[in-house]
Amino acid sequence: MLVEEGGVELEVPGEATDGKQDGVFYNPDMELNRDVTVATLRAYRDSGVGPAASYLDATAASGARGVRAAADGWDVTLCDVDPDAVALGEENLARNDLSGTAVHRDANALMHEARFDVVDVDPFGTPMPFADAAVRSAGGLLCVTATDTAPLCGAHFMSGVRKYETVPRNTEYHAEMGLRVLLSALVRTAARHDVAATPILSHVSDHYVRTYLDVDSGARAANDCIEQLGYVDHCQRCLYREATTGLVPDPLSECPHCGEHIQTAGPLWLGPAHDADFVTAVRERVTDGFGTAARARRLLDTIAGELHTPTHYDQHRLAKRWGESAVGMAEFVDTLRDAGHEATRTHYGGTTFKTTADVTEIEAATR
């Protein structure tokens, strides 16, 4: 069937009689992801901070993301191991009178052989089998999606340990846990190749984690990224948490707030997950022709204003623990600010917030 997305027309598989997708994979629910990608590519190109001509859609499937990049002026290569996907990608480029190359290759083989200014890895499940090749292939910007949220956030604990070589914990800030597990794995992978991978935009939406990393060669720069890894100690009872940088864990023996057992997660990325100025630039390049324009702008506005603390809180979860009634988020955040604490809402949920206050200070300020 034919669909229109972001000003291009795409032939994509329809649904089989059993309701499942028939043929090459295409997910209409990822339109927000693709809209933000195009806006990010525009902001990155306009920034002039790195090379911005060639773009690799490393796991292209129907080619929707790569075709949209080609329509925006990028020299696009679509890569897929499925010959049907390659043929569909070629058809979608031709349908829109766009130049580009579709190659039938294993993505890792291609990325080990060639460099691209921007490399985009959006596979089904974990991106980690592609990470080593991707950080070596990306000349300026690395874009990564992960859809295996259960392993990332610790709900499937051992799967997360195996795939991401870290200890994930299933907490009430599970979305951000998943993001920081992914960032930690990507930063450590890049550092093995003397590459610094610095997040400039990240979001957790629906069923996936998406991040964009500025990549720069050099051992010293990679070391600076490693120094932003560390651990988070978390109390499941009172929701106290404490972050500590460093690769050698030194967990708390008990919660300093309530005395209960502490869980430790890490190594996690504890540094900023976005650059506020860059996110604002991305937001400015979301156009009305995007199908998710309103949602994308709201998302990016929220991210740009988020504090860089490595975890967030959920007001409803805290209120339930305290036996209190929840109040409006604007009022709640203002109360924290009036008490002298930095506080912002977050994109992780309608009742989530970040603050420089610990859980004891939050309770004192708002109860």
Image (cartoon, grey):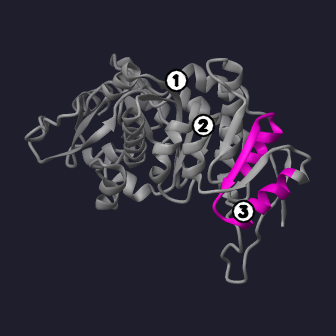
The mark nearer the N terminus, 2 or 1, is 1
The mark nearer the N terminus, 1 or 3, is 3
Which disc is residue 275 wearing? 1
Quarter-of-image position of residue 279: top right
Q: Is residue 75 magenta?
A: yes
Quarter-of-image position of residue 29: bottom right
Amino acid, disc 3: Ala
- Residue drawn at point x = 66 percent, y = 32 percent: 40
Q: On screen, 341 above or below 310? A: above
Query: In this view, which residue lies farthest toward the bottom?
Result: 17
Q: On screen, 70 above or below 18? A: above
Which disc is residue 85 wearing? 3
Q: Which is closer to the viewer, label 2 or label 1?
A: 1
Amino acid, disc 1: Asp
Q: Secondary structure at mark 2?
A: helix
| Separation of marks 3 and 2 at Cα, in angstroms | 31 Å
- Residue drawn at point x = 83 percent, y = 40 percent: 71
Residue 222 seen in render: yes
Q: Quadrant of the C terminus?
A: top left
The mark nearer the N terminus, 3 or 2, is 3
Q: Secondary structure at mark 3?
A: helix
Q: On screen, 77 above or below 199? A: below
Query: Which residue bears the numbered disc 2?
Result: 299
Q: What percent of the width, then of the height, locates residue 286?
A: 73, 33
Chief SS of the magenta region: helix
The region drawn magenta spans 64-93
